[in-house]
Amino acid sequence: MSSSADASSTGVDTTTTDATGEPTTGAVEPCPDEAIGIEGLCFTLSTVGFGLSPAVVDSADLDLDGFVDVFAANLSVNEQHVLFGDGAGSFTEIAERPLAPVGQRDAAAADLNGDGIPELVGANLIVGYVTVHPGLGDRAFDSFTPVAAGSKPRRIELVDLNDDAALDLLAVSEDPGPEETEGLIIRLGDGMGGFMAPTAYAVGPRPYDLARGDVNGDGAADVVVTNYDSETSYTDVQVRYGDGLGGLTEETRVFEVAKGSRRVVLNDLDDDGALDILTASYESSSISFLPGDGAGEFAVESEGQWIPLLIEDVTGVYDLAARDMDLDGVTDLIAVHREAGVVSILHRDAGALSGERFFIVVGVHPLSMTIEDFNGDGRPDVAVANSFSNSLSLLLSVTP
């Protein structure tokens, strides 16, 4: 780890970005009660075991007790790790974990069959299908059912695309496979736990991540995909527009972002009422910001619109989220830096892309995070999956 990413005695290093986006070192402002962070944004840090090689962590109330639980997509073991929350920031592990194929790359949970109990869903890149574990209640899950979604599904999302009250499956597959000729797959749900035949849509080479939102204001869900395997010096981000019937139109737009961009997020970062595109670059350790106009168009990427999150020469912005962490009405940016083993939080100033930034050292090789209120104080907390240390780092808000 480089010197600027090293933790101080409080476990935090802070950096402030100036108007040009260049980082300048700032003094650490102490938090009360041995918490870590900056004034007005404080966390405690703890670690729990989280199976073997957790690649992705997500969260939902799986047992319907009113508290948020966390679950993983595990790369190196044939099971999904689940931790049940108590609403106060602690978690309980179940002895019998849902069995799943080795090589999971994504996980999600939602009620697919209308019984009120969430199903546990995983994307399995190696075996080449999506798994659906029906929820049985009492913290138990049935054996999985395989669902085809390309031959190498990497990212999934469960969402009602056609407004029929049944959740649908949206997936990106690195290799579409012989039956689906494109890499963005939609399977409409039947409301009983099953899915209709897949419909495939064209995206670029090696689609990696997806985000969903209404970017053109027509009320239909649109899809944004990062295409990581670009032959140019940039990575493509592709917008496919929804038709309001559960599918996508023929219209598509492609925009350039920083090379190595994998993660994509939709958020109204500039507070103009239109969704913007944010992508996290693993190679340049920066965030590309493409402001949207609310009609489906986005400003062309330029160096002035990059938000640098460099830690000297350390690369690896592997995950990204946009949330108002201190409830001040301004969206902050949270990033997972894989190689450095840290989470960075850019506490944005109102009306600016800059702000004070600080790092919190987590586990080894962190890959993913989920943000929810785990301890019941009404403020967002962060859970980070560390793939090499087989652990979950919990950053619980203790901001006064």
Image: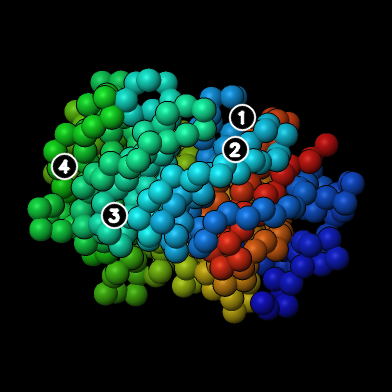
- For marks 4 and 2, give the CA distance: 33 Å
Query: Mark 4 and mark 3 in contact (Cβ < 8 Å)?
Result: no
Query: Mark 2 and mark 1 in contact (Cβ < 8 Å)?
Result: yes
Which circle's residue, 4 or 2, is located before the other in the chain? Answer: 2
Q: Nearer the viewer, mark 4 or mark 2?
A: 2
> Percent from the top left, x then y, of residue 2?
68, 78
Which circle's residue, 1 or 3, is located before the other in the chain? Answer: 1
Instruction: Check disc 3 and report its element: helix, strand or loop.
Output: strand
- For marks 1 and 2, give the CA distance: 8 Å
Which residue does the numbered mark 3 point to in the structure image? 153
Tag shown at residue 67: 1
- For marks 4 and 1, give the CA distance: 34 Å
Residue at 28% across, 70% down: 230
Instruction: Check disc 2 and report its element: helix, strand or loop.
Output: strand
Q: Nearer the viewer, mark 4 or mark 1?
A: 1
Instruction: Check disc 1 and report its element: helix, strand or loop.
Output: loop
Which residue does the numbered mark 4 point to in the structure image? 198
> Percent from the top left, x then y, of residue 381?
66, 42
Which circle's residue, 3 or 4, is located before the other in the chain? Answer: 3
Determine whether 242 is above or below 236 in the image: above
Q: Quadrant of residue 262?
A: bottom left
- For marks 3 and 2, give the CA distance: 27 Å
Q: Amino acid at mark 2?
A: Phe
Q: Amino acid at mark 1?
A: Phe
Which circle's residue, 4 or 1, is located before the other in the chain? Answer: 1
Is residue 360 found left or right of 161 in the rendered image? Answer: right
Residue at 47% across, 27% down: 137
Q: Is residue 287 visible?
A: no
Which residue does the numbered mark 2 point to in the structure image? 84
Q: Nearer the viewer, mark 3 or mark 2?
A: 2
